[in-house]
Image (tube, rainbow, N blue to C red):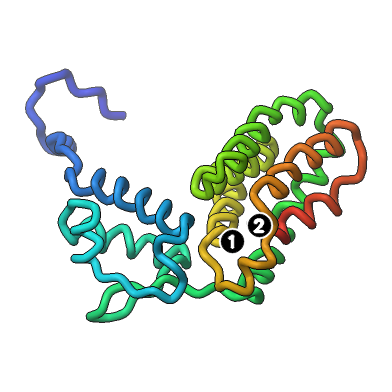
Amino acid sequence: MQQPREPGATAHAGWAPLPAPRRMPERLSVRDQVLDELRDALLAGELPPGSVHSAPVLAARYGVSATPVREAMQLLAREGAVEVLPNRGFRVACHTERDLAQIAEVRMLVEIPVVLALARTLPGARWEALRPLAAAAVAAAAAGERAGYAEADRAFHRAVLGLAGNPHMVAVADDLHRRAQWPATAPVLGGRPTLLAHAAQHDELLTALAGGAPAEHLLRDHLASTP
C-alpha cells in the first residue's frame, strides 16, 4: 500500500501530480444568468410560441455576447422549450393540448405512487411542515408573477417528493414539471386554471395528506392542470 506523499514532495514513478487549479470560464456564469432571463421571458409570454429568435438579437437585448445566449438556448432546447433552426436561430416550441396531456400522464406515473406510499407512513406533522412552501406559491400567484409561481410550484413538488429520499426520482419529476410549464398555444392557455386556483390545490393536498384522507384524486387533478 502506497504511503501518502508529504506536502511539497516531488512526484515520482507511481504518483500522478494533481493538475493546477483553474478558474471556470466567466461565460458560464453569464450563460446561467441569460438562461434565467430567457426562462422568465418564456413564462411571461414575452417570447410567444412559434416566434423565432436569433442569438445576436437576444444577445443585444441582454447586453452580452452571442455565445452564452446560444449555450442557454441549447439547454432550453433539451428541456423542450425551443427548437433549433439551423442557420436561423431558435423557435419557441408550440405545445399542444396533447403534448401537455402526455407530460401530465408521465408525471402521474412518477409522482402519484410515491405520494401515496408516503401518505401511508408519514405523520401529519411532516406534511404540515410544507405549508410555508404552499404559502409561497399563493403569494407568487397573488402577485401575478408567472415565472415566480412556476418556481414556487416546482419547489413545492420537489419538497413533497423529496420526502421519499430519492434525489434521482426528484430530478426526473422536476424536469417533467418544467416541461409542463413551458408556453402553450392559445387554445390550451384558455383551458388552463388561474395561478391562484392552482396554488390553492397545494393546501388542499396537504390537508388531505395530513389528515389521512384520500388524496389521489386531488393530486391527479392538480398534475393534469398545470397553469
Placement of 64 over or under 20, stated as above or below: below
Instruction: Identify the residue at horizontal 86%, vertical 46% (top origin).
Output: 215
Mark 1–mark 2 CB contact (< 8 Å): yes
Residue at image location 67% in from the left, 35% down from the top = 134
Label ID, residue 180: 1
Residue 23 in view, yes or no: yes
Per the image, label 1 sits on a secondary structure element best described as: helix
User: Furthest-left residue in view?
Assistant: 10
Q: Is residue 191 left or right of residue 30?
A: right
Residue 137 in the image: state x and y as whole percent: 62, 39
Tell me which corner region of the image, top left, top right, bottom left or bottom right, holds residue 206.
Answer: top right
Dividing the image into 4 quarters, which one contains the C terminus?
bottom right
Amino acid type indicated by mark 1: Ala
Q: Residue at the spot x=67%, y=53% of the render?
A: 194
Q: Residues within 10 Å of mark 2 (few under 14, many from 20)?
A: many
Location of residue 145 in the rendering, given as x and y in whole percent from the top left corner: 52, 45
The amino acid sitting under disc 2 is: Thr
Q: Helix or strand or loop: what does disc 2 sit on?
A: loop
Q: Name the residue under label 2.
A: 226
Earlier sequence position, callout 1 versus callout 2: 1
Q: In this view, does 103 lie above or below 4?
A: below
Q: Position of residue 174 (x, y in %)?
A: 57, 51
What number is the disc on residue 80? none
Where is 28 relative to 20, above or below? below
Is residue 17 visible to the viewer in this orientation of the structure?
no
Tell me: residue 70, above or below residue 213.
below
Quarter holding residue 165: top right
Q: Distance between the residues labelled 1 and 2?
A: 7 Å
Q: Categorize mark 1 by other alpha carbons within 10 Å: few (<14), some (14-19), many (20+).
A: many
